[in-house]
Image: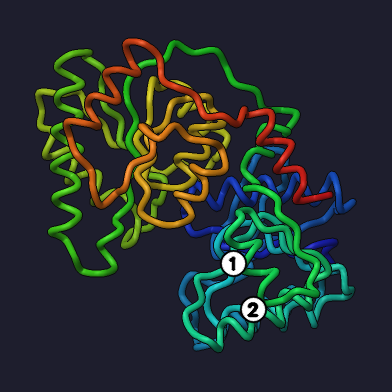
Amino acid sequence: MNISDAYLVGYYGMKNSGDDALLAATIWGAKNFQNTKHVKASTPIPLLLRDTDPFEALIKNKQSFRGQNRLLNYREAFSADRIIFGGGSVLHTAQDINIKRHMMSLSQSDNNIAVGVSIGPFKDTEAEQACIKFLNQCDYVAVRDLHSYKLGRDIAPNAKIKLSFDLAPLLLKHDSFEFKPMTRRGIAVCLCPKEHAKNQPDLEHQRLVEISEALLEVYKQTGEPIHLININGHSEFGDDKVHQELKAMIGQQVPCTVVPYDPNPFRLLQRLASYKAIISMRLHGSILGFLADTPVLSLNYHEKCIGWCDQIGMPQSLSIDAEDVNHESMALSLLKGLEHGFEKPRLTVEESIQRSLINWK
C-alpha cells in the first residue's frame, strides 16, 4: 500500500472547472504550508494539473456494488498521514459528512483540516448534528464565507473555525503561471441548468429568452461575438444543453460558439482573460473572471453567489437576481460598461489572494 502525505477530498474529477481550480489551489497550499510531497486525490477519473504528477483514479465513476467508493476512500484514508478537505460546498448531508468523519478517524494523524469550504444548508437535523461532530473532529476548519462562519460558530462554538476566502485566488501563486497579454474580444456566458433538477423548464426558458434578447441588442450595437463557456462538462448535469438552447435562440446572425469543458483550470483562466465581459451563473465562472480582471455580471441563483458578490464588493448594477433577469437592464449594463468602462469591485485581486492565504495560516 502506497502511503501518502495527504489525501485530498472534494468534488474532484466531476468535470467541473470550479472544482478543478479548487484542487489545483489545494495542492499548492498543501505543498507550501503542510510540507506535503506525495499527495493523492479522491477522483473517479485520471487528472493532470499544472506542476503535478498525474492523479490516478482512486474511486469509481460507476460502482460495482453499493458502498464501493466509501470503501475505496477508507482505504486511501488509512494509508494517508492526513486528510485535507479542499474547498467547495461539502457539508450538506449526514451520510456524506459521516463518511468524511470516518476517513479522519482512519488517517494516521489528528492533523486533518478543511480549507475554503462552506457549511450548509443542511438537508435535515441529522445532517446538522453530523456537521457539529465533523467541525469538532477537524484540527482546523477555514470557511470561505461569513454565513458559514456564523453558522459554524453557532453550532460548534468550541471548534477551531476561521473565516477565510475561496481557494481559487491561489491559482495565481503558481510560479509557472502568468497571464499572456491578449487583445480582449467578445462576451462570455457561463450558465448552469438550475431548474433542470427541479423539472422547471419554463422558468429556465424565460431566463434564456431575456439573456438572448440582451445579447442580440449588444451585438447590434457593438459587433462583439458571443462565447458560451461550459464550466461543468457532466453529460447529464452539465452546461452544454442550456448553452445549446441559448445558441439556438440567438440564431445564426450572431457569431456564437459553445466552448467545451476544459479540464485545465489555468487554460480556462487565460481564456476568461481574453473577453471584454462575462455573464455568469456559475460561481467559479464569476470567481475566475474576477481573477482574470474581466468584468462580470453575476446572475445569483444561490446564496453562495450573493455571498461572493458581498465579499468582493461587487457593484450593485453587476449583481443580478437570476430569477429576475430583464433584457433591457442587462443590455444597458453591458453597453454602458463596454463604452465607458465597467465599475470595479471594491476588493482587488491581490487582496483576494491575501485573504485566500488565510486558509493555510
Q: Is residue 214 above or below residue 152?
A: above
Residue 100 image position (x, y, % from top left)? 67, 77
Categorize mark 2 by other alpha carbons within 10 Å: few (<14), some (14-19), many (20+): many
* Residue beneath the point at 23% across and 48% down: 324
* Residue beneath the point at 26% across and 69% down: 198
Residue 2 in view: no
- Mark 1 and 2 residues: CB-CB less than 8 Å, in contact? yes
Q: Which residue is mark 2?
A: 131
Q: Quadrant of the N terminus?
A: bottom right
Which element type, helix, strand or loop, lies under badge 2? Answer: helix
Q: Which residue is mark 1?
A: 119
Q: Which three-letter amino acid code belongs to the residue tagged 2?
A: Cys
Which element type, helix, strand or loop, lies under badge 1? Answer: strand
Q: Is residue 258 above or below residue 223?
A: below
* Residue beneath the point at 66% across and 77% down: 155
Nearer to me, 2 or 227? 227
Q: Is residue 134 left or right of residue 37?
A: left
Residue 37 in view: yes
Q: Which three-letter amino acid code belongs to the residue tagged 1?
A: Ile
* Residue beneath the point at 80% across and 62% down: 6
Residue 126 image position (x, y, % from top left)? 55, 88
